[in-house]
Image (tube, rainbow, N blue to C red):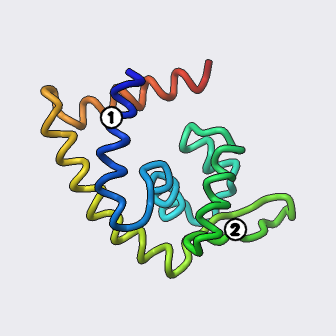
Amino acid sequence: LRMAARAVSSVYDRHLAGAGVQASQMAVLWAVSSADGVTVKELAARLAMHETTLIRTLRILEREGLVALDVGSDRRQRIPRLTRSGRSVFSKALVGWKKAQSEVAGLLDDGLADTNRKLVRLARAAWRS
């Protein structure tokens, strides 16, 4: 499974390279783009990701000018949002993402949607344990 995960990540990374992002960064950009006003802690839970891992990726994206981290109502909270540049890169990266999805889907006998459901269930179960 780990070998397959690395192989799939390399497919996505190859297709996303033209937009200047990696698969792990694209997942965060995607989550931020659809999480208006959500704190980093809430976003980490949605992504089944450790908060420290998410904040590290957000800081990289912030340095690259793709994400801004606004202060929440509690000054300890950070609320990520895409910058104008981030929206542009995200749009460009979506093209590569779709190509990667098509490539991976072509390799799966039982279809991408079914495999994705199984993997999400696995990730959530592993995250809870």
* Figure check: 97 above or below 50: below
Which image quadrant for residue 66?
A: bottom right
* SS at mark 1 in the image: helix
The percent position of residue 106, horizontal first and vertical second, equals 13, 39
* Figure check: 27 above or below 124: below
**Neighbour class for label 1 at 10 Å: few (<14), some, many (≥20)?**
few
Residue at 61%, 41% (x, y): give it.
45
Q: Nearer the viewer, mark 2 or mark 1?
A: 1
Residue at 66%, 38% (x, y): give it.
50
Residue at 37%, 41% (x, y): give it.
9
> Which badge, 2 or 1, is on the more N-terminal residue?
1
**Neighbour class for label 2 at 10 Å: few (<14), some, many (≥20)?**
some
Q: Which amino acid does label 1 sit on?
A: Ala
The percent position of residue 109, horizontal first and vertical second, equals 13, 27
Q: In this view, does 98 lie to the left or right of 66?
A: left
Badge number at residue 69: 2
Q: What residue type is labelled 2?
A: Leu
Assess whether mark 1 and mark 2 are in contact (beta carbons under 8 angstroms). Answer: no
The percent position of residue 28, horizontal first and vertical second, equals 52, 54
Q: Residue 21 or 111: which is nearer the viewer?
A: 21
* SS at mark 2 in the image: strand
* Figure check: 36 above or below 39: below
Q: Residue 3 or 81: which is nearer the viewer?
A: 3
Residue at 60%, 39% (x, y): give it.
49
**CA gap, disc 2 and disc 1:** 32 Å
Which image quadrant for residue 126?
A: top right
The residue identified by callout 1 is 7
Extreme right residue here? 75
Q: Residue 91 or 39: which is nearer the viewer?
A: 91
Which image quadrant for residue 35?
A: bottom right
